[in-house]
Amino acid sequence: MNAIAEQIRTVVVEREFPHPQEKLWRALTQPHLIEAWLMKSDFQPVSGHHFNFRAEWGSVDCQVTEVEPIRTLAYTWNAMGLESVVTWTLEPTAGGTHLRMEQTGFRPDQEQAYQGAKYGWQHFFNSLEQVVAKEAN
């Protein structure tokens, strides 16, 4: 492995939700729900699908790389020089679902993006929790 590859960093956020995987999966894959907790998008849970997240500050260019319904979702996340991959993993638990989000690809010169992601994903998880709690089963 070269020196740069060894310095690539990852943001991981994990949380247990008292909801079934299907309910979280809907919040991760249905555009109107994604907009309620993350950003506007033209997302479709189809491998190879190109889409964008849009916010006041700009947009994120993405492509779906993996879809395993109610278990795994991954897509590229390219914005402002950051080329990363976001992977969602859902695991059933006794009380609901363990959700893990991993965003990897932060280079050493992207400290601001890395710190922003660490903060931002915590905020997004809080919003996701509120959206999922309001959704009908």
Image (cartoon, rainbow, N blue to C red):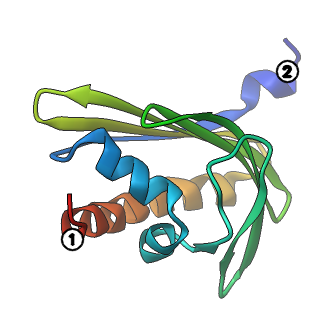
Residue at 80%, 43% in the rendered image: 48
Instruction: Name which residue type carries label 2.
Output: Ala
Q: How many angstroms separate mark 1 from mark 2 (CA)? A: 46 Å
The residue most toward the top is 1
Nearest to the observer: residue 81 or residue 90: 90
Taking 54 as reference, is 93 above or below it? above
Question: Label 2: which residue?
Answer: 3
| Crowd band around label 2 with a 10 angstrom C-alpha radius: few (<14), some (14–19), many (20+) | few
Number of numbered discs on residues:
2
Query: Relative to 24, is 108 on the left or the right?
Result: right
| Position of residue 35 measured from the top left corner of the image (x, y, whole percent) | 51, 75
Q: Name the element at disc 1.
A: helix
Q: Which mark is residue 134?
A: 1
Q: Which mark is residue 70?
A: none
Image quadrant in which the C terminus is located: bottom left
Quarter where residue 65 is shown: top right
Taking 73 as reference, is 113 above or below it? below
Instruction: Judge whether residue 21 can be spotted in this image.
Output: yes
Nearest to the observer: residue 11 or residue 59: 59
Going from N to C along the chain, the mark reached first, 1 or 2, is: 2
Residue at 65%, 88% in the rendered image: 56
Query: Relative to 9, is 14 on the left or the right?
Result: left
Query: Relative to 3, is 52 on the left or the right?
Result: left
